[in-house]
Image (cartoon, coloured by chain):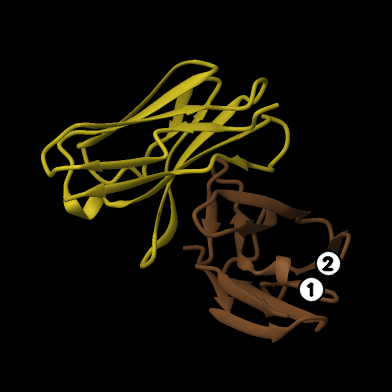
């Protein structure tokens, strides 16, 4: 298995632009997580899906952030409009429903100027 | 509110040394605790997962222990190697919608 796939790996954009991050979970995994990592705050869970349904989005910082999972093999995290303070590494992770271990993608490094 | 703390924030040791990384959490009502490794510019790799009913887990040169009553976990690395250099993070699953609460990590450098 190729593991969790994220694209793009790096994104540089100007303030105010829309940013879309993409994730393909491991086949057969029923849970998908979006995280944000910064030096100051470490890893923070943004949103969690189970069987394509958002279960907990309490970590989504603002209405500028939205996430979708239209099917079991694809999810997006969108920021519109983007701001410099959104600069971070965004990770996607997936896990089988019955166990707790999470498998992480390589992350997307977002820089908003 | 569950909080996870990792001490030290950074550690530098000579190759071959045995070492211990510490993780503490404020609420003992946890579902499991996981240790991850993160290499620079890369994602996280799960190392060990300890269920709340377990005391320890071992994988090769790694041994993780869990003491729920004291809110502590340790990751023991035996005979450290330069390839062990990375950031090690612990995360607690409180069972609340599968949300992991993360420490900030310990940055480990093993010098040849």
Give neighbour class at mark 2: few <14, some 14-19, many 20+ (Cα, 10 Å): some
Colour applied to chain A:
yellow
Q: Secondary structure at mark 1?
A: strand
* As drawn, B81 above or below A106: below
Looking at the image, can residue B65 be seen?
Answer: yes
**Residue with the most extreme front position:** B112
Give neighbour class at mark 1: few <14, some 14-19, many 20+ (Cα, 10 Å): some
Give percent across and percent down for residue A1: 70, 26
- Front one among A21 and B81: B81
Q: Secondary structure at mark 2?
A: strand
Give percent across and percent down for residue B7: 58, 80
Residue lying at 69% horizontally and 85% vertically, measured from the top left: B13
Mark 1, residue position: B76
Residue lying at 21% horizontally and 37% vertically, measured from the top left: A63
**Residue with the most extreme left position:** A16
Colour applied to chain B:
brown
Tell me the subunit letter for badge 1.
B
Tell me: A83 left or right of A86: left
């Amino acid at each position: 298995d190729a593991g969790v796939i994220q694209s793009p790996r790096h994104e540089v954009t100007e303030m105010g632009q829309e940013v879309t991050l993409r994730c393909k979970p491991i086949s057969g995994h029923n849970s998908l997580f979006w995280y944000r990592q910064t030096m100051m705050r470490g890893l923070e869970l943004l949103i969690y899906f189970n069987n394509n349904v958002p279960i907990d989005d309490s970590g989504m910082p603002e209405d500028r952030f939205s996430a979708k999972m239209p099917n079991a093999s694809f999810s997006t995290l969108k920021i519109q409009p983007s701001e410099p303070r959104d600069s971070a590494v965004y990770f996607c992770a997936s896990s089988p429903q019955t166990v707790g271990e999470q498998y992480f993608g390589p992350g997307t490094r977002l820089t908003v100027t | 509110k569950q909080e996870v703390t990792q001490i030290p924030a950074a550690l530098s040791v000579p190759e071959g040394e045995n070492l211990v990384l510490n993780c503490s959490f404020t609420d003992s009502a946890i579902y499991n605790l996981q240790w991850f490794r993160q290499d620079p510019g890369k994602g996280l790799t799960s190392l060990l997962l300890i269920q709340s009913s377990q005391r320890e887990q071992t994988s090769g040169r790694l041994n993780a222990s869990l003491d729920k009553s004291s809110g502590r976990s340790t990751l023991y690395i035996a005979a450290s190697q330069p390839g062990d250099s990375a950031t090690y993070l612990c995360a607690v699953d409180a069972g609340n919608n599968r949300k992991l609460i993360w420490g900030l990590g310990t940055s480990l450098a093993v010098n040849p």
